[in-house]
Amino acid sequence: MSTNNNNNSLSLLDRIRINHGNQKLREAFGKLAGTYRERAVKLLNDNRILFYTLYVLLPDIDAYNLYSLLNSRNKMALKMSTKALKDENIRTNLNSLPKYDNRSLYSTLKWMFQTGYEKDGSDDEFDEVLDKIFAILVRKYEDKTTLPILANMIFKRNRQDRYIHDLVWAFFEIKDPFILELVADFLRSPDDKDVELACRLLNIESIAMAKNMDRYEAYLAWFKENRFFLHFTGENYQLTSTPTFYRVDLDAKYLSKRSVYRNRKRIISYSESEKSHLKDFNELEYEERVVLAEISHKIHNQNPRVWSDWIKSPVKEQKFIAKLGLGGDFL
């Protein structure tokens, strides 16, 4: 949802802010609240009001002690902003508001997000509020609709040399490998900062890329091959300056066991015979396991029946075939 709405769909307070700026909005609202308190509250409780406008007026809402007169959505939105605010008096007053109803929290967060994200960068406190909103939407509600916007915000902030670590953390906390495609889109950006950040987030230096393909096409080819075998590592910028967010699970790729994520948790299980086979597989050197997993995956994709015979053969025999480059003979 864009906040660049037609003026007819905006509340009066939104129109004042957009047409005349934050300061004029506060001046006009202050005069109204001081004289016509009920009218001022009615404007605040207009269902069309944008969250950013409510946020701008927070000091005036506090100064005129209008908290108790706000509707439940506005109370909840402001209370959700508490931890990011530096003004201790306002924080204390917001903390005194009644505990919000969790049943309404999601719809309030979505409203805050949809009517506030375009003002990212307005000030540090508001950015912190947005970071908190995104983190809850992703972690608590697994809301994937926010992820394309979140990706754009991360790269926009990075271009402006602004703080991105909390947003990156929230983005990857969805624990869905398919978000990597959103990041890969920025490999095609004309901005060097976008490309550099995309390479870092995708850990692209550790991925062998075909020399005759550009970075974007090469990454998509790699992703297509490995997308069902990627596992979230839990690494982030709070733990290391060079996190690797996803790695290929070679065991899963070797046995063609696709990962399933439920409630942001990866679910994968192996039978006793598969565990026994993996014991021999994991005794190989890392590079040998990479090659064998690739061959096994290729055979499985092209002929599952042949693969069922291949995978039962001893790992030493598979390794020998791989070294001779005879994997293709099984296809």
Image (cartoon, helix red, strand yellow):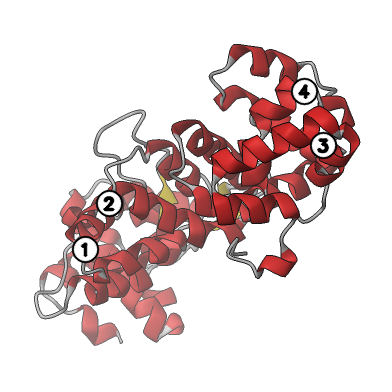
Which badge, 1 or 4, is on the more N-terminal residue? Answer: 4
Place residue 313 in its image quadrant: bottom left
Q: Quadrant of the C terminus?
A: bottom left
Q: Quadrant of the N terminus?
A: bottom right
Secondary structure, mark 2, is helix
Secondary structure, mark 1, is loop
Instruction: Check if mark 3's residue and mark 1's residue have beta carbons within 8 Å.
Output: no
Cα distance in 3D space between marks 4 and 3: 28 Å
- Residue topped by disc 1: 191
Label 1 or label 4, whichever lies nearer to me, is 4
Which badge, 2 or 1, is on the more N-terminal residue? Answer: 2
In this orientation, which residue lies closer to the viewer: 10 or 29?
Answer: 29
- Residue topped by disc 4: 64
In this orientation, which residue lies closer to the viewer: 35 or 93?
Answer: 35
Place residue 299 in its image quadrant: bottom left
Q: Is residue 265 left or right of residue 303?
A: right
| Residue type indicated by callout 3 | Asn
Name the mark on residue 102.
3
Q: Is residue 330 above or below residue 155?
A: below
Q: Which residue is pictured at 16% across the width and 55% down the height?
A: 205
- Residue topped by disc 2: 159
Instruction: Check if mark 2's residue and mark 1's residue have beta carbons within 8 Å.
Output: yes
